[in-house]
Amino acid sequence: MKTSLGPIQYCWPKEKVVEFYEAVAQSSVPLVYLGETVCSRRRELKFSDYLALAQMLKAAGKEVVLSTLTLIEAQSEFLELKKQVENGEFTIEANDVGAIYLAKEHGIPFVCGPSINSYNAATLKKFASWGMQRFVMPLELSKAWLTQVLDDLAPRQVEVEVFGHGFMPLAHSARCFTARHKGLTKDKCQTICIENPEGLLVQTQEDQPLLRLNGIQTQSANYMDLCDQQTQMQALGVDYFRISPSSLASIALADKLPAKSASHDRQCNGYWHQLPGLALS
C-alpha cells in the first residue's frame, strides 16, 4: 500500500501553496492530487498555476492527478472543468458526476473522488466501464462496507484509495456559511476564507467542537485518523492511503508512513468502525 496526498482543501495564499508543493517534490510521497475542489471564487491560483505545479511534481517523479470542483454551479465553472479534463497530460480526479461525463465523452481515464456517491459494486463497475482507474471510498462508509464491495468486485480491475488522515469533507452547499458568518454575501465574499487556513471551528453551546466551516464546505471538527488501520487496509487490498493536507506537517506524516500519527485530542475514526463519525474507537 502506498501513500497519497490529497488536494489542499483550504484557501491558502499562492506563496504558501507553492512552498507546500516544492516541499512535496522533495518528499517520498508517490501520488499527489492538486487543484481547487471547494470554491471557484478562490482565485489565488489559476489553472495555469496548477498545471505548472503538476509539471514540476511530475519532473520530481510524482504521479500527479488534477482534482476537480465538487460542486459545479455555473457555466464558467463547467468551462474550467473542461480545461482540466482536456489538459492532455494528467489524469483527473472527478469530484462531480459532470467530470465523469466529460472524461467518458473524451475517452480518458479518471479517478472517482470521495464526494461521488459510489455506494455499491454495480455503480463502481459502471464507472469502471467508463474509464475509472481508481476510486476513493466515500468517507462515511466503513471497513465492513469496503470488505463486502471488494468481494463483489472480484476479480478487481480498479484500484482503491481510502481517506486515512485529515479533516473530513462532509457536505457542500450553494451558500457560503463562512461569508455569512463574516456578514458578507457569497458574491462579494472578499475570499474571506483565506483568513482561516484550517477552516473555522464551530462549537456546540457546551463548547464542544462540532464542525468546521471551510467556505461552502462543511468539514469535521476533528480529523480522521486511521493510521493504526494500515495493516488491515493492506490485507484488504487497499492500494493507497490518503492524507488530506492541512499544513506542512502533513508532508512529514506522509513521508514516515506506514506509522502511527501522534496522539491528539481532536482525532476520530468512527465511520470506519460503523460508529458515529466523531467517535474515536
Image: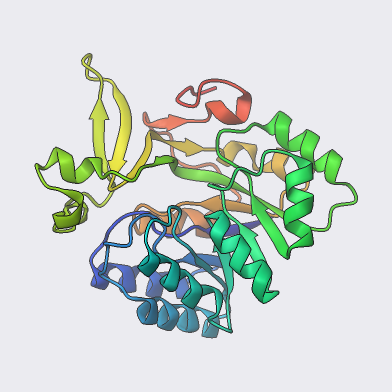
43 or 207: which is nearer to us? Answer: 43
Q: Find residue 134 and report its image quarter.
A: bottom right
In the figure, 104 relative to 70: above or below? below
| Residue closest to the far right | 155
Horizontal relation, residue 54 to residue 184: left or right? right
Which residue is most to the top?
206
| Residue positioned 64% across, 65% down in the render | 110
Tell whether 155 sits left or right of 255.
right
Quadrant, the N terminus? bottom right
Q: Residue at x 47, y 69 (%)?
A: 81
Residue drawn at x 39%, y 66% as measured from the top left: 75
Does residue 257 show up?
A: no
Q: Is residue 252 left or right of residue 256?
A: left
- Up/down of 28 relative to 244, above or below: below
Q: Position of residue 10 (x, y in %)?
A: 32, 54
Q: Is residue 145 visible?
A: yes
x, y percent for residue 21: 40, 71
Residue 252 is situated, as x and y percent measured from the top left of the image, at 44, 58
Horizontal side of residue 166 vs 247, given as left or right: right
Number of labelled discs? 0
Look at the image and tell me in which quarter the C terminus lies: top right
Vertical comparison of 178 with 222: above or below: below
Give coordinates of residue 58: x percent, y percent. Answer: 54, 81
